Amino acid sequence: MRVLCIGDVIGNPGRMALNKLLPIVKMQYKVDFVIANGENSAGGKGATPDTVREMMAAGCDVITSGNHIWAMKEIVPSLEGDQPILRPLNYPPGLPGQGHIIMGDICVVNIIGRTFVGNFDCPFRAMDDILKRIPDNIKIIVVDFHAEATSEKVAMGYYLDGRVSALFGTHTHVPTADEKILPKKTGYITDVGMVGPTHSVIGCDVDEVIERTISQVMHRLSVSKDKSVTFNAVLFDIDDITGKTISVERINKEVSL
Ligand SMILES: [Fe+2]
Ligand SMILES: [Fe+2]
């Protein structure tokens, strides 16, 4: 199974780029299943049922998320099962939504890191727990680890090596160049990047971010209006029988809106 994992989709430009590029990429790379992080799909912060619908219509199968998933309250019914959108598994118990989903032969899990992100339950123990609950006949397990620190993500990769098919990092919106197959055949990348304006600071307007960084006055940021949009994704080719990764490839494209 060829699984395409797409970085955080940023607002309207991100969704438009997804619409334009995803059908082409799916055909070109013979993609079977698409996972995209949608936590920034609505105006750069949060997701709504409409932005999720738009991402699904563009060709996504499962939408993952992260710390910004709670920004838009109208997403809650979707998290409760209306749409295939996940929120990180290791939030405190009792919150709406789920951190994993099984669709046919594949299980997608979404976890969140703690270093420089927040006081969540331990993502390592959360993975131990969920792996015990996924039926044995599900061989393909792909994890979106939404985290800031590269070291925490690398450590998780090795912790899960041989226990999941692939792990891709999200949240920083900046792709890393360390895609690899770990010793026990788990496909890995520290961060896949984003689908968002090319000339931006992780998707946001450059001048606003510089002003905010210097002044330390935390105004709400706007999505950059740059007409060029970067599309960052990673493709894992996974053996259907063993669930091990055979190859991993970064796919980076750019499109003008
Ligand atoms: Fe994000
Ligand atoms: Fe995030």
Image: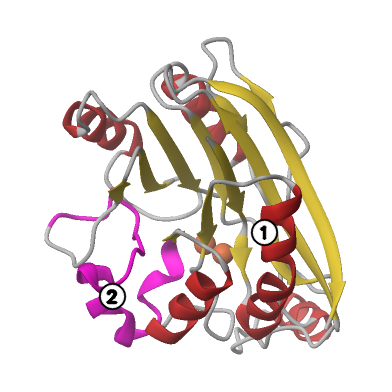
User: x%, y% of residue 25?
Assistant: 73, 56
Query: For the residue labelled by badge 1, is the local secondary structure a helix, a strand or a loop?
Result: loop
User: x%, y% of residue 63?
Assistant: 44, 62
User: x%, y% of residue 223?
Assistant: 69, 84
Which of 48 and 69 lies nearest the eye of the viewer? 48
Q: Which quarter shows the C terminus?
A: bottom right
In the rendered image, the vertical position of residue 144 relative to residue 12, given as above or below: above
Q: Earlier in the sequence, mark 1 or mark 2?
A: 2
Which of 126 and 142 lies nearest the eye of the viewer? 142
How far, Cα to Cα, is label 1 from label 2? 24 Å
Region of the chain picked out in magenta, as a range: 65-93
Circle 2 is placed at which residue position? Answer: 78
Q: Residue furthest top?
A: 183
Left or right, 209 with reference to 60 = right
Q: Which mark is residue 173?
A: 1
Count of numbered tags: 2
Kind of residue sitting beneath label 1: His
How would you rate the neighbour count of disc 1 (Cα within 10 Å): few for under 14, some for 14-19, many for 20 or more?
many
Q: Residue at x 84, y 70 (%)?
A: 198
Quarter, ligand 1? bottom right
* Membership of 188 in magenta stretch: no
In the rendered image, the vertical position of residue 68 relative to residue 216, given as above or below: above
Kind of residue sitting beneath label 2: Ser
How would you rate the neighbour count of disc 2 (Cα within 10 Å): few for under 14, some for 14-19, many for 20 or more?
some
Q: Is mark 1 within 8 Å of ligand 1?
A: yes
Left or right, 120 with reference to 115 = left
Q: Residue at x 77, y 47 (%)?
A: 251
